[in-house]
Amino acid sequence: MRKILFISLVAFVGLSCKTTQNISSKSPYAKMLDTSSVLSQSMTGMALYDLSEQKMIFERNSNRYFTPASNTKLFTFYACLKTLGDSIPALRYEIKSDSLIFWGTGDPTFFHPDLTSTKTFDFLKSYKRSKRFYFSDGNFTNPYFGAGWAWDDYSSYYTVEMSPLPMYGNIVRTKIENGEAKPQPSIFDNSFYKKDTGTEIERTAADNQFLLPKSLLTKSGYQQDIPYKTSTGLTQQLLIDTLRRNVNLLKIPVTATAKTLYSMPTEPVYRLMMQESDNMLAEQLLLLCGTTLKDSINSSFAIKSIKEKHLQDLPDAPKWVDGSGLSRYNLFTPRSIIKLLEKIHAELPQEKLFSIMANGGKSGTVRNMFKTESEPFVFAKSGSLSGVYNLSGYLITKKGKTILFSLMNNNFTKPTSQVRKEVEKILLEVRNRE
């Protein structure tokens, strides 16, 4: 009897597994993946989750680890939601009888060219010239570059150095006007050198010398962002130039009695980071999380703390090393990203969340995708590196369902544009079918 029962049980389990495999193989999404000539030689992971029914409706390689690229910003965004309040902490400061001592927090908004905030400047300008100003970087314990970043991207707009008190976005925004280069901040006016060849401005690796191809001087209206090489001394020079007063340097930790100045609301900063995939904002916001949790500007501490306190319930432990996704050391699974999307959705009203994400056909890095209808129905975060294209987020079906999705594509040699179109085609099928 026991032998018959055991055989029957084995048969049932086998039938159950076979049925699951049949369901998976019969799924239209499985067929699209299996017959795709674009995805045939690369690794693809996919997960679809019905939010109202709280169940997975399709999985393919969802338990495998992928390089996430800028899908990492979803983790940074969640860290901010769990750590920061409604406003960005801009400075820590201590007022003595004749002195003002201040520390950066990592706040990226101070004179950022794409954000409007003057509170830090107004605060520093409000103090009488009789007071001595001291800036300390004694709370900054982070490297300038993230682990696993490509070293030869130092001159590219997307690889901006990290610092305790960023100014002007830690970039030199250069415009060509009337045959001349006009950099902002203007402190770099005399740091440009003309060269005969090239198609864009480059910075030397060791210092802030900017090499300008002569051909660009004929392109009126040309604009380029180039990261500048940060240092405490340069921060001091920028403060002196901006405030028009002397600023001294200290290297002491934040005092126990230090107060906090706030610069601007968090929401527009999140929106710019998520829609335009701004790496500088992502890295500095993660540093801000570390500052808020502990008076030490360090992204590794922030990551460790967030993982321990808020991400223990992910299906697969994430390998998370930076805020932006520039590092190929980051590794996440599609099903863990689905869980993260669910957690983010629980933190914010859906309307506000969708306004922060890039909107298909309307804004951000997916503005040129999903243009089939007048109203956006995909709200997502893309992620691209060489051989990497991922898209994860929220999709509203024609039946009104909210589907959480993560499509991760690694190790392809075809043009990214082809993979992007394939991802779009699959998600349009989800939109019409679910």
Image (tube, rainbow, N blue to C red):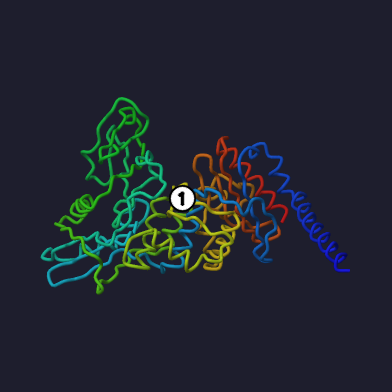
* Residue 177 image position (x, y, % from top left): 30, 36
Q: Nearer the viewer, residue 269 or 104?
A: 104
Residue visible at 26% across and 73% down in the picture: 256
Q: How many marks do you count on the picture?
A: 1
* Residue 228 image position (x, y, % from top left): 29, 45
Q: Where does the N terminus fall, quadrant-wise? A: bottom right
Can you name the residue that lies furthest to the top here? 196
Say which residue label 1 marks. Answer: 325
- Circle 1 — which element? loop
Q: Where does the C terminus fall, quadrant-wise? A: bottom right
* Residue 123 image position (x, y, % from top left): 24, 65
Residue visible at 29% across and 59% down in the picture: 140
Q: Is residue 131 left or right of residue 23?
A: left
Can you name the residue that lies furthest to the bottom here? 257
- Work out whether 83 lies above or below 362: below
Q: Tag 1: residue type?
A: Gly
How busy is the neighbourhood of tag 1: few (under 14 within 10 Å), some, or many (20 plus)? many
- Occupied quadrant, residue 416: top right
- Work out whether 390 lies above or below 19: above
Residue visible at 76% across and 49% down in the picture: 25
- Occupied quadrant, residue 80: bottom left
- In this orientation, does residue 375 appear? no
